[in-house]
Image: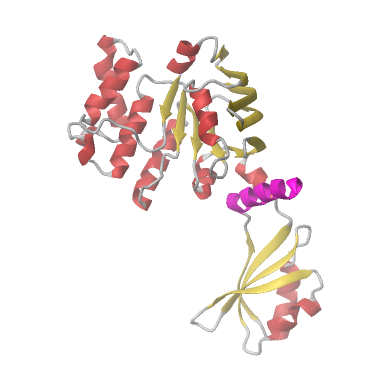
Amino acid sequence: MIEVKNVTKKFESTIAVDNISFEVKDGEIVGLLGPNGAGKSTTMNMITGFIEPTSGQIIVNGNDILKKPKKVKKQIGYMPEGVPLYYELTPKEFVSYMAELKLVKRKERKEEVQKVLKETGLEEVQNRLIRSLSRGYKQRVSLAGALVGNPDVIILDEPTVGLDPKQITEIRSLIKNLGKKHTVILSSHILSEVSQICEKVIIINKGKLIAVDTPENLEKATMDTNGILLTIEDPKNNIRNLKEQIKEIKSIKLVKDNNDGTKQYLIISSSDVDLRKQLFDLLPKQDIVIFELKKSETTLEDAFIKLIDNVKEEKK
């Protein structure tokens, strides 16, 4: 378990992280989110022991990182943003070097390196120079460096940045598999990615902790309207009278004008109103043919923007 207790980090007069507290349980995959400059990388660097907090405590598996730094660092594998690698080495040489730095026993080192190369899908390119590899393979090499030594905790800073869609899918799959054996903390600007991978989300803005919850709970908690996506055939344009007939409707917005004569609309009501039954009853009577009617889902991105905007409003 990771415990971050009342942690603050100051750089001269700038407060990068401001009195934050949270817990990460064993085996969780946790997303650390926030706008640029929010304090995500600083928080990760403090958990890894790369920089010290100005005040507060960070405890990893019962060990205070300031009192037992070597013991804590041995339990953490870190993949920093930007893939800092030694390009004149091969993946095998790089991972072997990382194993040596992490004090993996010499008699176990060869087997450990091969295990990690296989786990990260690097076996076929293990003897090629890193500089000749694609961006996706370079990410895998950096991840392999974090995994060698079998640390309890894996920390990944923007693990899919700069990758193409196929590479992103592959790295996501790797991260999901990591969650079966390790505790994982990752930061990402791709919120759909976090929603798919992570069981819990920690949101930081301007150094302050904004929210800690599951993606699903954050989506529900920030939903103040209900949206219905309605695809219809409406030759007489009777949809224009719908707001007058159903008073609970806040707005009707044309989303898409399809080539087959149908149109898709987004119908908004307050969060405590479900209009589906009324629409099913009323629309056929108005000579409107329903092709599809479904609830519009609130995403983690919607929740994130709402939470950040709420903080801005409070400060005004």
Q: Residue at x 52, y 24 (%)?
A: 47
Q: Quadrant of residue 285?
A: bottom right
Vertical placement of 38 versus 248: above or below? above
Using the image as rendered, state which of residue 237 and residue 156 is in the foreground: 156
**Horizontal and vertical percent position of residue 206:** 62, 39
Vertical placement of 78 versus 251: above or below? above
Q: Which is the main secondary structure of the residues drawn in magenta?
A: helix
Vertical placement of 93 versus 253: above or below? above
Q: Residue at x 62, y 88 (%)?
A: 235
**Horizontal and vertical percent position of residue 186:** 49, 35
Question: Which residue occupies the extreme front position in the image?
Answer: 13
Q: Residue at x 50, y 41 (%)?
A: 197
Task: Give the image's coloring scheme.
Answer: secondary structure
Question: Which residue occupies the extreme right position in the image?
Answer: 247
The mark tally for this picture is 0
Can residue 13 be seen here? The reply is yes
In which quadrant is the N terminus drawn? top right
Q: For residue 310: magenta?
A: yes
In this rendering, position of residue 143 left or right of residue 253: left
Can residue 28 be seen here? The reply is no
In this rendering, position of residue 110 left or right of residue 204: left
Q: For residue 170: magenta?
A: no
**Horizontal and vertical percent position of residue 141:** 30, 33
Vertical placement of 186 versus 162: above or below? above
**Horizontal and vertical percent position of residue 55:** 63, 20
Q: Which residues are magenta?
A: 299-316
Q: Quadrant of residue 254?
A: bottom right
